[in-house]
Amino acid sequence: MIRDFEYFAPKTLNEALALLEKYQDECKVIAGGQSLLILMRQGLVAPEYVIDIKGISELDYIKSDAKEGLRIGALTTHRAIEKSAETRNGFSVLVEMEQRLASIQTRNWGTIGGNLCHGDPAGDPAPVLMALNATLSMTSVNGERTMPVEHFFLDYFETALEPTELLAEIRLPVTPAHTGVFYTKFNVIESDLATVGVAVSITLDTNDGICEDVRIALGASAPTPMRAKRAEEVLRGKKITDNLLTEAGQVASTEAEPISDIYASEEYRRELVKVLVARAGKEALARAKQA
Ligand SMILES: Cc1cc2nc3c(=O)[nH]c(=O)nc-3n(C[C@H](O)[C@H](O)[C@H](O)COP(=O)(O)OP(=O)(O)OC[C@H]3O[C@@H](n4cnc5c(N)ncnc54)[C@H](O)[C@@H]3O)c2cc1C
């Protein structure tokens, strides 16, 4: 049963930030409630005050700019990202990721910001945003701070957000030329969280097709979404072959720190990382060659 709480529904960002400053650890922000309400119903979270930010329209937008890239307000729903022309233009991997995230009903109401702030290591957006080199903007009454998305996740369901802060915006730089990005996940139940998720971004040198840059990000493979940096080194500066991709997968599977749960054992997850890194790498490479 959900414990009684006092409810606020601010209509502006400033009102919400003032409430957060006032109530700090005693309050909880709610956006779509798709994750928070489950925790409240289970009694795992029992705030005195709930601040409903869903009505703050100034945090609900997708804007693209040829130089700056894409900016997504934290209250943008998964479905809006999936359907947006701005996302499709240059960031279609986000669309592909969203199409496999939950059901349409959940995507219609759940927000990208809520997904990230929940800090679930199995969430789909985080690995993709890591592969796309995203930055997060957090705001409080004291102003804004930014950080790369890969620094945001501290531990299992724990993020770098301070109790007085809101996640405001996700920023994605323009994807460099000759870059291919691919996301894949393995899940037991269709439209559910990943058993393992892998995103790979590969940038090729224009002249010789050598791998100039690579980002490999894993979901559901450690207490937090993570970069597989040793696996990236297997590919960086080389002409990528199937053998190298297999090796990168093997290295990534040793970097991962997966747990065993009802969906998969630790060993099975390592095997999934191995296979999915090679597979996603192959698809990203094919896209990079055509980009
Ligand atoms: C049936 C079901 C299936 C799902 N399947 C998937 C899946 O396949 N893949 C996947 O990735 N996810 C999945 N999810 C999770 C879903 O995507 C997230 O629950 C949802 O995106 C969270 O967004 P929300 O707006 O509902 O957040 P809420 O539940 O409102 O909030 C989640 C957390 O974030 C905090 N928060 C929210 N917004 C902000 C903000 N702007 N600033 C600071 N803190 C904030 C809240 O305080 C809370 O701690 C599933 C959920 C359900 C219910």
Image (cartoon, rainbow, N blue to C red):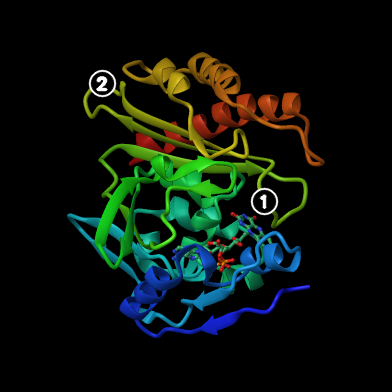
**Circle 1 is placed at which residue position?**
193
Report x, y in % for residue 121: 59, 44
Report x, y in % for residue 88: 40, 60
Compared to residue 254, the image places residue 38 above or below, namely: below
Report x, y in % for residue 8: 50, 83
Report x, y in % for residue 36: 62, 65
C-beta proximity under 8 Å, tags 2 and 1: no
Choose between 223 and 218: the one closer to the eye.
223
Q: Residue at x 62, y 39 (%)?
A: 220
* Sequence-first tag of 2 and 1: 1
Q: Residue at x 26, y 41 (%)?
A: 176
Quadrant in which the N terminus appears? bottom right
Q: Secondary structure at mark 2?
A: loop
Choose between 208 and 191: the one closer to the eye.
191
Badge nearest the viewer, 2 or 1: 1
Q: Quadrant of residue 37?
A: bottom right
Cβ of disc 1 within 8 Å of ligand 1? yes
**Circle 2 is placed at which residue position?**
208
Q: Which mark is residue 283?
A: none
Q: Residue at x 46, y 54 (%)?
A: 94
Q: Secondary structure at mark 1?
A: loop
Quadrant in which the C terminus appears? top left
Of the four image quadrants, the one with ligand 1 is bottom right
Q: Quadrant of residue 17?
A: bottom left
